[in-house]
């Protein structure tokens, strides 16, 4: 858990109480980030408010909320459950539960004194969709009276002819906070758990080498199961093109996709200059994921080969310096369950860093056909030997509470402060 801070004199809304919405509540009540939370479930749940309180009080991945906040004492932290008022107190924070509206435009945020909403439903991801469509949209929250909307997922614009709106931005705490303009941006995506971890793995290397020497990069995330998968095999929905997510999660390794490469370019624009491939493999674990990052870096000379020690030193220096709040470096031998509750955006496992330098042979006769003029246009019969270092880095992250939700919480607090300063 992040360190406790001074409680901000404002209310924040949370739309959706799935995995990320629930854990956002945990994060903010544990830190007492705000004087109150207004949570919209969009529907009735169980037999009443007490059942919602029971749902919030414990978690299969992280245990009781009381133990998360107080450690081994595990004291009771939810009380004053008032069905008539729709309120409860969690760790001293007043939490109001709304259970009527699914359409963001119809949620009475303004009436409840909410100026900032975190949309954690995963349903409304397109910032170009207008506020008045019947099924609802992100912009509907703005119609409901709020000033800013934070999306707990990457933007997904369905109409490919449309550009990103001027009032929307992707911003990851600790990486590109400066991209957020409080005067202009009203809809803010905090990307995804994988993009967040990846950004902290890539940024120290870019800061050290620059983008020029990096000839190409790729990554694979070995990712825990998510709610988009099925417990048992199920017939795909009409029009579905990913048949594997309909297979049972308990006993399968499932190949799938990730939008981390595209989202990374929004967070770190230099990555748009580098060829980048991102893939995802889902495995039967409940949380705790791993990124395997691979880069090809051109050496200045064969005598100045990049070493494993140099790569690890880059990360260690970053983890002790400018990225100390969000990046960790370790030479411990970890497994995925060690990451449950780990608050770093990325944990670099230094003992697994791999580096190999070799000479890549480039036939100038082929190259010269692509570059007819210039220094390569001379002796087309020769072969150019280019020293290239292949680098493999392993980075752990808790894709739910530890890494992503805590990083989203940090961003939410920062944006709330910017509203209070206006």
Image: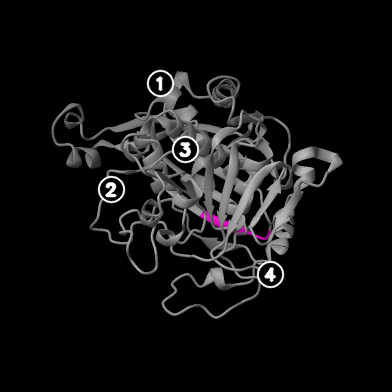
Badge 4: how crowded within 10 Å, few (<14), some, or many (20+)? few
Give the distance between the C-alpha atoms of the residues marked 3 and 4, in whole angstroms: 35 Å
Residue positioned 72% across, 40% down in the render: 334
- Tell me the SS state at disc 1: loop
> Dot 4 corresponds to which residue?
46
> Dot 1 corresponds to which residue?
301
Q: Which of the two discs, 2 and 3, labels the residue nearer the N terminus? A: 2
> Dot 3 corresponds to which residue?
172
- Tell me the SS state at disc 3: loop
Q: Observer-nearest residue: 22 or 33?
A: 33
Residue positioned 64% across, 71% down in the render: 248
Quarter location, residue 232: bottom right
Q: Is residue 1 left or right of residue 66?
A: left
Residue located farthest toward the front when viewing the structure as drawn: 84
Quarter of the rendering occupied by the C terminus: top left
| Magenta stretch, residue numbers | 280-284
Q: Observer-nearest residue: 276 or 56?
A: 56
Main SS category, magenta section: strand
- Residue 281: within the magenta? yes
């Amino acid at each position: 858990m992040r360190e406790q801070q001074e409680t901000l004199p404002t209310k924040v809304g949370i739309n959706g109480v799935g995995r990320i919405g629930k854990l956002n509540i945990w994060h903010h009540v544990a830190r007492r980030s705000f004087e109150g939370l207004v949570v919209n479930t969009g529907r009735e749940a169980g037999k009443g408010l007490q059942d919602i309180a029971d749902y919030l009080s414990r978690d299969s991945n992280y245990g009781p909320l009381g133990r998360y906040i107080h450690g081994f004492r595990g004291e009771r932290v939810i009380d004053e459950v008032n069905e008539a008022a729709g309120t409860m107190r969690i760790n001293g924070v007043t939490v109001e539960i709304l259970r009527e509206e699914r359409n963001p435009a119809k949620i009475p945020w303004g009436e409840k004194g909410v100026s900032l909403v975190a949309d954690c439903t995963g349903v409304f991801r397109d910032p170009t969709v207008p506020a008045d469509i019947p099924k609802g949209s992100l912009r509907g929250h703005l119609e409901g009276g709020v000033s800013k909307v934070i999306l707990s997922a990457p933007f997904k614009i369905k109409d490919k002819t449309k550009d990103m709106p001027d009032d929307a931005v992707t911003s990851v705490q600790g990486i590109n906070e400066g991209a957020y303009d409080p005067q202009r941006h009203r809809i803010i995506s905090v990307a995804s758990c994988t993009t967040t971890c990846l950004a902290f793995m890539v940024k120290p290397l870019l800061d050290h080498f620059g983008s020029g020497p990096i000839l190409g990069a790729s990554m694979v995330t070995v990712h825990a199961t998510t709610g988009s998968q099925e417990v048992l095999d199920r017939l795909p929905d009409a029009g579905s093109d990913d048949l594997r997510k309909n297979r049972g999660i308990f006993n399968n390794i499932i190949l799938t996709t990730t939008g981390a490469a595209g989202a990374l370019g929004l967070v770190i624009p230099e990555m748009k200059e580098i060829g980048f491939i991102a893939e995802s493999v889902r495995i039967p674990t409940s949380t705790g994921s791993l990124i395997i990052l691979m880069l090809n870096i051109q050496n200045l000379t064969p005598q100045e080969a990049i070493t494993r020690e140099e790569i690890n030193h880059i990360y260690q220096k970053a983890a002790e310096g400018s990225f100390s709040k969000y990046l960790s470096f370790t030479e411990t031998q970890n497994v995925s369950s060690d990451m449950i509750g780990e608050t770093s955006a990325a944990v670099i496992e230094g003992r697994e860093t791999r580096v190999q330098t070799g000479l890549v042979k480039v036939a100038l006769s082929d190259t010269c056909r692509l570059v007819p003029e210039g220094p390569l246009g001379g002796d087309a019969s020769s072969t150019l030997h280019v020293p290239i270092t292949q680098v493999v880095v392993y980075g752990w992250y808790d894709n739910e509470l530890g890494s992503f939700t805590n990083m989203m919480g940090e961003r939410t607090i920062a944006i709330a402060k910017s509203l209070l300063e206006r």
